[in-house]
């Protein structure tokens, strides 16, 4: 494996998946919904499917979900015994109306959910409830407002417009994240997921260089052998390596291309690096290490 091989592989992958990853675009005016849908798409939980159920029941918003825990005064840490199934005390209380009409609707959404719950389903639901309640109480039930308030603190200004926030450079965005670490206030959200929430926002100039170093990206770089060219295999070094390749795609497009090409989520249409039979159809398998 050499740099030219890496360049050939990644260029091919980005081009091969382009028709799919172009569908990932999001818009700033919808970022509050994106926060719920993308922020908790973890551990196999198909949050995007669950949020459609929330929409059907009229509670797909931070504000609507946020009011549910107003009646709860206990520990905000997840407790499986308390909230780990529909038969748990918490959800039975929710069903019986202790957490209001929105709570009863939330219970019904869980009851009607037919998608993939994943291994962390009950944990993710609890995190959604806690985080939305936090944003409702302190940030007007809005993720976009939360971001702008964190940016105001960072810039030491009195006010910041949407345009001010969206036009910041990538370097400023990275500095903002480094100093403020805004995800620390968002229960269940880490840096990688935070980048995933923002990364496809069309209006955000800094997003084109965002990079979510998720399990699919890590796996791809290892199975192809490209990771051997990156001695310190960590996010910052991976980002520098990919940018230095000088490809025609943005870093975010490369990020999405890799994810689409070999993630379990996209396995039906792609999944080449996860299936030895599919691997034979890959047009760059002659330079790939195939470290299955």
Image (tube, helix red, strand yellow):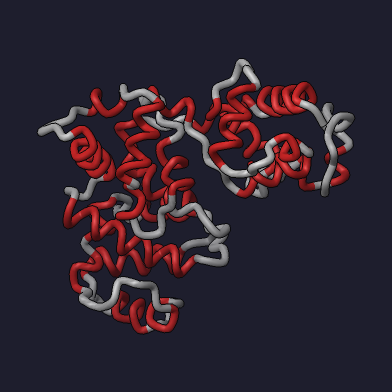
Find residue 152 and report its horizontal and vertical position in percent.
19, 36
- Describe residue 81's horizontal placement relative to residue 145 as left or right: right
Q: Position of residue 265 (x, y in %)?
A: 63, 47
In the rendered structure, the answer to whether residue 124 lies left or right of residue 187 reads right
Residue found at x 28% / y 58%: 65
Q: Is residue 119 left or right of residue 271?
A: left
Question: Where residue 178 appears, x then y in whole percent?
Answer: 37, 41
Residue at 79%, 27% in the rendered image: 2
**From this viewpoint, is residue 52 visible?**
no
Q: How many marks?
A: 0
Position of the N terminus by quadrant: top right
Residue nearest the observer in this picture, 218 or 3 = 3
- Hey, which quadrant is residue 175 in on the image? top left
Position of 48 relative to 208 (above/below): below
Residue 58, position in %: x, y?
Answer: 30, 53
- Taking the spot 21% from the left edge, 69% from the top edge, the residue there is 100
């Amino acid at each position: 494996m050499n740099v030219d091989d890496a360049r050939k592989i990644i260029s091919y992958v980005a081009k091969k998946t382009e028709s799919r990853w172009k569908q990932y675009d999001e818009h700033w005016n919808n970022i509050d919904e994106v926060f719920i849908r993308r922020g908790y798409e973890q551990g196999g939980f198909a949050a995007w499917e669950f949020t459609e159920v929330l929409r059907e029941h009229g509670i797909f918003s931070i504000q609507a979900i946020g009011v549910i825990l107003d009646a709860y005064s206990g520990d905000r840490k997840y407790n499986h015994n308390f909230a780990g199934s529909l038969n748990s005390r918490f959800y039975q209380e929710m069903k019986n109306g202790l957490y209001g009409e929105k709570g009863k609707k939330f219970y019904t959404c869980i009851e009607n959910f037919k998608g993939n719950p994943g291994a962390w389903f009950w944990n993710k639901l609890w995190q959604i409830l806690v985080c939305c309640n936090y944003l409702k109480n302190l940030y007007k039930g809005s993720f976009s407002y939360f971001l702008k308030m964190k940016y105001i603190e960072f810039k030491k200004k009195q006010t910041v417009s949407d345009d001010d926030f969206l036009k910041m450079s990538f370097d400023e965005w990275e500095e903002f994240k480094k100093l403020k670490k805004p995800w620390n206030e968002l229960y269940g959200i880490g840096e990688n997921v935070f980048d995933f929430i923002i990364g496809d926002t069309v209006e955000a100039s800094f997003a084109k260089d965002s990079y979510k170093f998720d399990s699919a990206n890590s796996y791809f770089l290892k199975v192809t052998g490209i990771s051997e060219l990156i001695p310190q295999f960590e996010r910052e070094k991976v980002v520098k390596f990919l940018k230095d390749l000088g490809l025609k795609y943005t870093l975010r497009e490369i990020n999405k291309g890799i994810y689409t090409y070999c993630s379990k989520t996209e396995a039906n249409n792609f999944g080449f690096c996860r299936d030895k039979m599919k691997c034979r159809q890959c047009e760059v398998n002659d330079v790939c290490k195939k470290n299955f």
